[in-house]
């Protein structure tokens, strides 16, 4: 029985590592890391950024896979939610910038000024949508 568990652990870690590596490679191939580091003026820390994203992806997979409780309380949950939302928003903005979504959108709708407000509104809308989803639709779980 313990051999079966060891094989499952090896397969699970291998699959998680492959998915995390593919995720990092996909984002890196699109140039999103360099774009995020350019926005943050942290180009000299790109290796650290890539390492932390890979580590966070792997640890998150392990926590979800093995249902590990992380007792951080409501304040910790709020901080985690804020950080997850910031990462998702930055990632979406960087990906949209890579594919030139915002310049095309601005040209089509005739927007000349206020692009930062549009980007902030998109992020705020995502945050509000996540809060509504969590507080209104997840109460019964």
Image (cartoon, rainbow, N blue to C red):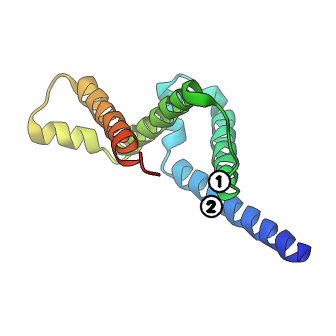
Residue 67 image position (x, y, % from top left): 67, 53
Q: Is residue 83 above or below residue 98?
A: above
Determine the residue positioned at 26% across, 39% down. Answer: 102
- Which quarter of the picture shows residue 37? top right
Determine the residue positioned at 83% across, 71% down. Answer: 5
Q: Secondary structure at mark 2?
A: helix
Q: CA distance from mark 2 to mark 1?
A: 10 Å
Is there CB contact under 8 Å for labels 2 and 1? yes
Q: Quadrant of the N terminus?
A: bottom right
Labelled disc at residue 124? none
Q: Nearer the viewer, residue 50 or 76?
A: 76
The residue indicated by pointer 2 is 19
The residue indicated by pointer 1 is 61
Q: Nearer the viewer, residue 27 or 82?
A: 82
Determine the residue positioned at 63% across, 35% down. Answer: 49
In this view, the mark in front (2 or 1): 1
Determine the residue positioned at 73% across, 66% down. Answer: 12
Quick check: 51 left or right of 110?
right
- Sequence-first tag of 2 and 1: 2
Quick check: 56 left or right of 117?
right
């Amino acid at each position: 029985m313990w051999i079966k568990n060891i094989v499952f652990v090896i397969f699970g870690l291998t699959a998680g590592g492959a998915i995390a590596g593919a995720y990092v490679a996909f984002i890196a191939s699109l140039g999103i890391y360099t774009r995020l580091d350019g926005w943050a003026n942290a180009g000299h820390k790109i290796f650290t950024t890539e390492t932390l994203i890979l580590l966070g992806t792997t640890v998150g997979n392990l926590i979800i896979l093995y249902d590990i409780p992380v007792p951080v309380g409501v304040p910790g949950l709020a901080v985690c939610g804020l950080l997850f939302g910031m990462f998702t928003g930055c990632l979406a903005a960087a990906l949209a910038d890579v594919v030139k979504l915002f310049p095309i959108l601005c040209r089509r709708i005739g927007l000349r000024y206020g692009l930062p407000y549009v980007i902030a509104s998109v992020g705020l809308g995502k945050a509000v949508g996540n809060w509504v989803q969590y507080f209104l639709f997840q109460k019964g779980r």
